Amino acid sequence: MQNLLVLGIGNILLSDEGAGVRAVQYLMEHYRIPPQLTLIDGGTMGLEILPYLEGKSHLFIVDAVASGQGAGHVSQKTLLDAGIFFRNKISPHQLGISEVLSAATLTDCLPATIVLFGIEPKTLQAGLSFSAEVEKALPSLLKLLVQEIEATGITLEPKTAS
Amino acid sequence: MAKRIVVDPITRIEGHLRIDCEVDNGKVVKAWSSGQMWRGIEVILQGRDPREAWIFTQRICGVCTTVHAIASVRAVENALNLEVPLNAQYIRNMIVGAHGIFDHIVHFYHLCALDWVDIVSALSADPKETAVLAQSLSDWPNNSYNKIKAAQEKLQAFVNSGQLGIYASGYWGHPAMKLSPAVNLLAAVHYLEALDYQRRINKVVAILGSKTPHIQNLAVGGVANPINPDSQSTLTIERLYYIKNLIDEIGDFINKVYLVDCAAVGAFYADWTKYGAGVTNYLSVPEFPLDTKGDTFDLPGGYIANGDVSTFQPITSFTDQNFRQGVKESIKHSWYNGDWDRHPWEEDTVPNYTDFQDNGKYSWVKSPTYQGKPAQVGPLANVLAMYAAGHEPTRKIATMVLEKVGSIARTNVPLAALHSTIGRIAGRAIRCAVLHDTLVRQWTLLMDNIEKGDYTTFNEPVFPKGEQRGFGFHEAPRGVLSHWVVIQDGKIKNYQCVVPSTWNAGPRTSKDEPLPYEASLVGNPVADPEKPLEVLRTVHSFDPCLACAIHLYDPDEKQLVRVKAI
């Protein structure tokens, strides 16, 4: 059975840096979440995320991604193996999402399919609101996420206003 | 001729720290520690509801989320003179204890051990020899030949797959790596086991903090965990017993693996007791409040001058006047407007970037002092304070670790050996074992209090008109954290966080005295300026973390670590 973890990462206090977390929070608020789907606001945490990978077949990571395609650019990249993350780090042995994935490999809980969804930030200034570009692009990121979550065989039902 | 080396950035975790060293004759003669990013996050809090401040402050840093949440609610409670129900203190204390244990284990095995342990060498070790060594040091059941061999094969497969990951940028084969292959393998095997145990202790935080990576159960005035022994949806006796099991499992790992490995690594690197003392004024605060006001604590804290434990001045309560008046920050060498020494309540934060000036401004970090002096903070500072205060569990564990190091190194190791790079690492292991001892006690206190029929977890805060000032301190894994709040008519008027890494990593003070990072690097050996492993050892021994928490993913496979010899 499919078991999907959607992990939003980034810092919500640094404007566009928090787009991944905000996207996941939006899904939590607007959809009924079936048991085979887990949504986590991972913030900027490292190894604390490891327990949530246990038993997952799919991992979607939603993050601010510097793709160089212009602010607000929405991207999707399937990581055939987690090796794409395993490269020179911002510092030796920096503990970020890359290390969580290596730790997952070493503790035998790396999901078989890992997809990175990204939105290119314009600003990383301290602040709680997005740039106009990211604000405008967010609906297309959400649409893409919902579509890809459903492509794994999970049905997302919007919460009805009561 | 002196050579200048620049390591940028140096933190293994969140944050951007640049270290410049002048190296002459194979030794560091002068150092600069520079925070390369401005947070400015405190400004976001101005005008907000003080009851919500902790939700924002726990996002300041991806590593220290819980600690900023705890310090924030304590600061607002202090401003309101609000007492916290006993159950809430115990639940918070258990979160604090479990988080501290998690953080210390991750630091030793996953952030710092690779400065001392050569993974590539571990692959060539004879697992039989490692098993004999491991069993001579500890009766940990996983130290069997079969388990060690299996772990070595797993590491080998991981390295063969080309996904070096965490190991990609280690200084393998560096002349300062001194452990034998057998000892390297022992540490590498326990590195893998530590991944599993850190996950177990982190479950305690997750259960008490409401099951997500960010705790959600805090409130100004208590916690939001309803206690009802009969209801499944609250903190039940069954859940509390599950937590106790996790606490017991981690206790075995700390005592039979972490303390032993730390002693063994320390014994083989005994020459590192000569380097890295730096600033030996130590500051820590008491932790684990045992009453509703915060007048009695399970673990002591206080100030020690010049490395002399007989000078110990205890800090005794959440309203301690020495602490309240003793903390100041200078911006003489920081990228802010002006040149002042101010109390946190009186500070402003107006950026003024000038470029890196060796004798002028060179960091975004401010420079804190205690009673006008630089002070080192962190687990070692806390262990020395607890030792000075006569805290029995600390004395027992510290003596045991020093004796173990002495028996492996075949020499006598005095308490003074802790004033060093390797001593900071040992101090963290000792504190981790003390935290575990405390965590067990907090669990018992909570159970006993519930048994008495007390289910209260929250006192409603009331915000009077006018201005209130408060401070909240917390002995966090990296040392003293304090939040300072000024409230005006129920809204935040000013908010400052004086974080542990500021005490250690800040630039020179207004009197041009160096803080701990800079002071500890002077005299540090550097065998090869292109590969300054020894500089990393000393800086990493502080568990560096500049709380700016940026997490941008960059798909270019470019080399982001810059080590430059000028």
Image (spheres, coloured by chain):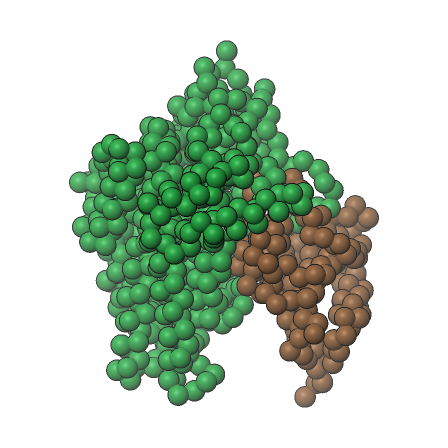
State the residue at coordinates (56%, 57%): A107
Residue B460 at x, y percent in the picture: 39, 76
- Asked if residue A146 shows in the view, the reply is no
Q: Residue at x 77, y 56 (%)?
A: A78
Q: How many marks?
A: 0
* Chain B image colour: green
Q: Residue at x 30, y 37 (%)?
A: B408
Q: Quadrant of residue B316?
A: bottom left
In the depicted view, which residue is nearer to us: B340 or B425? Answer: B425
Quadrant of res B566: top right
The residue nearer to you, when weighing B72 against A80, is A80
* Left or right of residue B399: residue B470: right
What residue is rendered at 33% in x and 42% in y? B263
Tell me what hue chain A is rendered in: brown
Residue B95 rendering spot, x and y as whole percentages: 40, 64
Locate residue A136: give its quadrant.
Answer: bottom right
